[in-house]
Amino acid sequence: MARIDTETTSQIVKDHNGKPELLVQILQTIVTRFGWVPPETVRQLAEELNLSRADVHGVVEYYHDFRTKEPGKHIVKICQAEACQAMGSRQLTDYAQKTLAMSMYDTENDITLEPVYCLGNCACSPAVMIDGKTYGRVDESRFNALLNNLRGDK
Amino acid sequence: MARTKIYVPRETAAVSVGADEVALAIAQVAKKNGVDIELIRNGSWGATWLEPLLEVEVDGTRVAYGNVSAADIASMFDADLLSGGKHERRLGPTDEIPYLVNQDRWTFWRCGRINPLSIEDFELHQGFRALKKAFVDGAEAVLEAVAESGLRGRGGAGFPTGIKWRTVANAEADQKYIACNADEGDSGTFSDRMLMEGDPLGLVESMAIAGFAVGASKGYIYLRSEYPLAHSILSRAIETARDAGWLGENIKDSGFDFDIELHLGAGSYVCGEETAMLESLEGKKGIVRFKPPLPALEGLFGKPTVVNNVISLASVANIINLGGERYAGMGVDRSKGTLAFQLAGNIKRGGLVEKSFGVTLRELIEDWGGGTASGRPVKAVQVGGPLGAYIPADQLDTPMDYEAFIGIGAMIGHGGIVVFDDTADMAQLARFAMEFCAIESCGKCTPCRIGSTRGVEVIDKLIEGVDREQNHELLVDLCDTMEGASLCAMGGMTPYPVRSVLKYFAEDFASSGKK
């Protein structure tokens, strides 16, 4: 994923009318588009929103969505919550980590693997989200098929 | 000749199992066959186990086809789909599907039925009728109807909505707010999402009614970021309502101003707690506030604020249309009206079942749900999300009633029902409850922040068999501390699932991980 530049950051702040109370929305916009929040962006946001760096840093650190490490091109989230556990998400998670030869939060070969706690797809468990799209009834073979699709468009 | 209408849900669960591909295939095959159809992307009826559920309208009747895949479409057209022709996927008329027939659809009655983004379709189905009635009857009548209905907060806490609204209405302030909690983080719950995807304008209308009743000109929806499709549908619905003059200044010449701002969460479970949500809406860390002051008096930006769950709000329009008394006539004792139960986890027929309170857990799981998906016996059922107790199979005859559930040390919460079969490792689930609390704790109070981590450690020792008696006692003591001394339900209720495992499934600590 690309790294956000200073002009784009300023533009996003402007789109939110420079309101500090929209910090969470501003960060969400940044992460949706660029995947993560680099340290220099924290500094710039603090300046432009007239907040302390500690304030912005605190908010970034608090929320799971606001990554401070650059993710891969594709983000694969596997639901870990109870409804998915009831349908084997723990086994699916083990399988995913083994197949991809990586652990949760790692980035390898353009793929970042992350846990997520409920995608609201609990009647189609286990659920997985890939690049913002939710998939249900994901067994090992469906997981493989979804990954092959990703590899196809690398 | 009018074009034949074909409905394919644009709803997260349906899309997650191929509804978009089905819709695409329909468009392609129709084009290839040279037939002109109208493809409508509706919400889901809630029979999730049948998704993708395709419907075709034949002489005013909608005929359903279940578990359709893109590969079926060509053969369905060959089998005269447009006349509701026979096919192995055909279920018959939608309104005869037993799963849907036997429900009490009050809040979800439009869901699945209408095109969620069409104001015309919404208005054809009584849309904005309640808001217009509110303008005529006045704020006081709305407050009375909501109080009379006995509606209680559907987010989980079950606080009487009428009292909350009255408190905000009576508060004097230059600005008041309606804050809709759409941070549906509990595992096993998806009714908020289904409503926002299937009847978003219904939520918009009810929020406007709430604003009118209490004197608030601004509403916020705090939507979790895990729901990107709901976000897209809801933002379009809000814009559509604004363009049609149902949001904004002087709505339909009523003299009432109301607008809605849609905010996204950022993956924090505790932001579903009302005060943490308000902090997050103010752009800060989602750290729980002390209460009092109540948000009804000092809420968002310090102003009087109605904080209601999506379903609480969305239930209001029909309370205004049909009367509070009618709503109160459903349900049992102090649990009035209906709840949208969500059948999830290891269940054969998962989905959403809106039913009056008083229905038993067994009826929901067996009659609607058809038992476990695996076909194995039910071992435990977690009701009310990750903070809800694990209910053993011999208590399934408990009626769904706030007080009856408190009586068995459980809670109904947001109505999520997660079924586990006999292969479930309950010790690991107890451990997960503590682990989840440790991951999601906002960190403000010690029992939750530190207790949860200690809880994981003690449970690990129990599983390993280290000083089992002492550690059992220690875990009970820790649960007492967390329950009694935490600031909010996160730390205060994490002990519920843990205690229920200690009480009903204690043998799993010895056998955990050894199967």
Image (cartoon, rainbow, N blue to C red):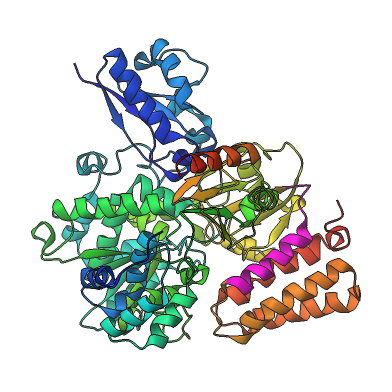
Residue A114 visible in rendering: no
Q: Is residue B427 magenta?
A: yes
Horizontal and vertical percent for residue B124?
A: 22, 39
**Relative horizontal placement of residue B133, taking residue B422 as reference (left or right):** left
- In the rendered image of this protein, does residue B50 appear above or below residue B187? above
* Numbered label tally: 0
Which residue shows up at 14% across the image and 52% down it? B243
Residue B281 visible in rendering: yes
Which residue shows up at 41% across the image and 60% down it? B312
- In the rendered image of this protein, does residue A87 appear above or below residue B440? above
- Give the dominant element type of the magenta stretch: helix, strand or loop: helix
Residue interval drawn in magenta = B421-439
Query: Residue B382 is drawn in which quadrant?
Result: bottom right
Report the residue that reaches farthest toward the left. Answer: B253
Which residue shows up at 19% across the image and 40% down it? B120
Q: Is residue B173 magenta?
A: no
